[in-house]
Amino acid sequence: MKQAKIGIIMGSQSDWATMKHAADILDELGLAYEANIVSAHRTPDRLWDYGKTAADRGLQVIIAGAGGAAHLPGMMA
């Protein structure tokens, strides 16, 4: 299996219904990805660690999405 170069992160499991569309396209293109739930509100330290270690883990792209105020993409940026 290829090492994931793309990360898909979302704020909660309920966001998967939306973020799954990104995963489906990546599957169609044959691109490896990882998908994780990382809440900007409930687990901000985990979000920080995810972003801080992304490049070391080989990620080149992060697709971030969340409902409501959507602080997750802003914090990841």
Image (spheres, grey):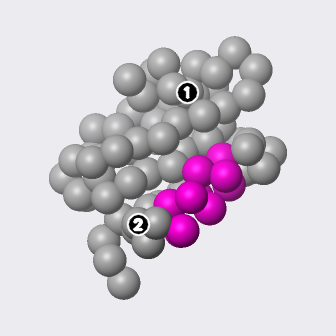
Which contiguous range is marked in magenta?
19-28
Residue 22 or residue 53, whichever sits in front: 22
Identity of the residue furthest to the top in this view: 69
Q: Secondary structure at mark 2?
A: loop
Query: Does residue 18 appear in the picture of this structure?
Result: yes
In the rendered view, tell whether residue 32 sits above or below residue 15: below
- The residue carrying mark 2 is 31
Q: Which amino acid type corresponds to the residue marked 1 in the rendered image?
A: Leu
In front of the other: label 2 or label 1? 2
Does the rendering let one see residue 42?
A: no
The percent coordinates of residue 48 (x first, y second) are: 39, 33
Tell me residue 14's x, y (percent).
Answer: 80, 45
Q: Quadrant of residue 41?
A: top right
Determine the secondary structure under disc 1.
Answer: helix
User: Who comes first in sequence, dot 2 or dot 1?
Assistant: 2
Query: Is 50 left or right of 13, judged from the image as shown?
Result: left
Q: Quadrant of residue 3?
A: bottom left
Residue sitting farthest toward the left: 56
Which residue is found at the position 67% from the left and 52% from the top?
21
